[in-house]
Amino acid sequence: MERENYICWEMGRGGSAHWYKDLQIANKIMVLCWYHLSRHCRRMVKMAYKEGYEKLLGEIITDLWFGRVGEAIVLLQGTQSEVKDLKAWKAIQGYLKNRWPYITNYQERRSAKLWIANTRVEKLNEWCIATRCKEKGRAWTYAGARAIAALEVARRNGELTFWRNKETLPDWNSPSAL
């Protein structure tokens, strides 16, 4: 099993991790946090259907756990006549379609002992952005905060010396590059 050096987790509802998309780090992996995905889907399905949604929700959550986003969307589309809140029903479909590239097979990741939640990234974000950039008297641009985050990630991955020598980060597919 290949070790993942760092994973960028897109948070469920446009949380503070959205800036990872733009980090200039080669071969980064973007995965939507299972906790945020399942929590948001539960909330939106409950809003859309109000009652009698438990079986449908179970099927949707199961499809998403195995990375079957298309099947989950088809399930939702097949129940339009049962919808109580059309806006919430459309919102959940849009949410899944927009995040489809970041929804993985969480069962496979768990079996491979890979992370399915963003606890490490949230802590890293809190430490390197909040602590570093929000001290008294400091003001950072969006680009500056991203640069600090990229440097901190490289430091925590043990890639800073490599970056200083080569002015690029190592290819994560070959851990021996470090």
Image (cartoon, rainbow, N blue to C red):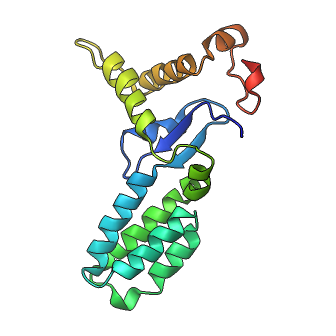
Q: Residue at coordinates 73% horizontally, 26% vertically from top-left? A: 175
Q: Compare residues 110 and 76 and report the one nearer the observer.
A: 110
In the rendered view, would you say 116 is above or below 27?
A: below
Q: Quadrant of the N terminus?
A: top right
Res 163 quadrant in image: top right
Q: Residue at coordinates 41% horizontally, 80% vertically from top-left? A: 56
Q: Compare residues 7 and 24 and report the one nearer the observer.
A: 7
Res 67 quadrant in image: bottom right
- Relative to 102, 126 lies left or right: left
Q: Compare residues 49 and 87 and report the one nearer the observer.
A: 49
- Relative to 34, 15 lies left or right: left
Q: Quadrant of the C terminus?
A: top right
Q: Residue 127 at x, y = what percent?
A: 36, 23
Q: Residue 37 at x, y = what percent?
A: 42, 57
Q: Residue at coordinates 29% horizontally, 73% vertically from top-left? A: 46
Query: How many badges with numbers are in the image?
Result: 0
